[in-house]
Amino acid sequence: MASDPTSALLLLPPPPSASFDQFKAAYEPILVAVCSKLAQQLDGANRTAILDIALSLPGLLSPSCQPQTRAFASLQSFLESIYRLIGIVCVELGLELDGPGGITARVILLDFDSVQTAAVTTGHPRDGPIVDLQTLAQSERPWERVYYPDNQVGRNLAAAFSSFQSQTKDPNAGSMHAIPDAPNWSFPDSLLALDDAKEFNAHYSVAVGGTFDHFHIGHKLLVTATALVLQPAEEAEPGRERKITVGVTGEGLLAKKKYAEFLESWDERCETTGAFLLAIMDFRPPDASAPRIERANGPGPDGKYIRMHVRPDLIFQMVQITDPFGPTITDEGISALVVSKETRAGGAAVNEERARKGWEGLEVFEVDVLHTGEVPTDDVENFASKISSTDIRRRRMEMAMATR
């Protein structure tokens, strides 16, 4: 397995609570240390360091948390917290986020019960974005280094990870590195708030939509939350297809965007989105067969798409959208839609259109918007620019003008 010197994994034990203040107090020093080390490794090179972050939470795969959509509100809140904190840290350190010369972070959720018991939950790798420790450790991803906080719970997590990793006998497996002076904390047996107020359905076809230009941490939060809604393979009906459909705005609708000349092409935006989905969901060893890619460029609704056949039962599909609804009103099989809280009206509009067609309405899941809370006042504008495709395009324009 080839090793990339700018690819690392950070193992995070569970936070002390769901409170962002305590979350930040526990994790910020650790993230600052790891991001600083990655920046040193880049040494000004025009490439991007990849940081995979495994955020541990107790009980993620326990029967009490099934179906996992019962914990959706709580899980997406944790994801929002960690991505917000990543943005804060990159502002503090003056690091580019998701661009050349900087760091791109990807968050997955790790079941902490499998850490404590070293239990083998399945005989084969689980799909993300929730994984067990064995799946993560034996994925053979090209991490040169695996970081963990040098406190008691961090050392326990690292030891369990190493015990599974050693079973692959990969001589190039990432070396373990403790982050010194990490704060100590304890955590409760459960951090998840479960919704028992309604019945949750199994969703085999889930949709999300957006422009996804210059893919950033806000997009990562939205797409990861969408993956959380999809029925996990372990709980799925045998042989039944599971599909994530991403509606990606067509270029015809983007002509009036600011700095439109620096918009990525539709194909680039689809490829980045698809690659991110693979990174957070597909943990098979690298010798497993690569996804089969199917492309179409036909007319009419859903005529242009890129379809990734990851496995016989798992498909990622990026579809061009040319109106506010996209495939949600052309594909009756879609049963759930993920929206950000600022676009919740779009979910209601979709269900009105489906009702006119006599179709079942979609179950709509809302995701928090990354916000500037707990960002130092002087850095609010810098943080906001890291989660704005418009500001990213503006910076690309300024860079291009500076090199002329």
Image: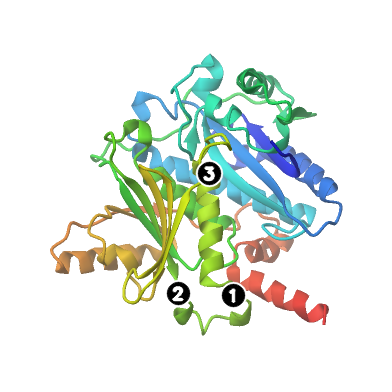
Instruction: Count residues near mark 3 (Cα–Cα under 10 Å), then give few for <14, some for 14-19, many for 20+.
Output: many
Label 1: which residue? 263
Left or right: 244 in relation to 56: left
Q: Are marks 3 and 1 in contact (CB under 8 Å)?
A: no
In the displayed structure, would residue 6 be above or below residue 219? above
- Taking the view exactly as shown, the residue that stands out farthest to the left is 358
Can see residue 201? yes
Q: Secondary structure at mark 3?
A: helix
Q: Nearer the viewer, residue 202 or 374?
A: 202
Label 2: which residue? 250
- Taking the view exactly as shown, the residue that stands out farthest to the bottom is 256
In the displayed structure, would residue 355 be above or below residue 63? below
Residue for point 68% across, 44% down: 51
Residue 124, percent across and down? 46, 27
Q: Earlier in the sequence, mark 2 or mark 1?
A: 2
In the displayed structure, would residue 41 be above or below residue 169? below
Residue for point 18% across, 56% down: 360
Left or right: 56 in relation to 306: right
Can see residue 370? no
Quarter of the C terminus within the rendering:
bottom right
Label tally? 3
Alpha carbon distance from label 3 to label 2: 25 Å
What's the mark number on residue 280?
3
Residue for point 22% across, 59% down: 332
Left or right: 124 in relation to 157: left
What amino acid type should be assigned to the residue bearing mark 2? Gly
Q: Earlier in the sequence, mark 3 or mark 1?
A: 1
What amino acid type should be assigned to the residue bearing mark 3? Ile
In the displayed structure, would residue 344 be above or below residue 316? below
Q: Secondary structure at mark 2?
A: loop
Q: Secondary structure at mark 1?
A: loop
Q: Nearer the viewer, residue 151 or 204?
A: 204
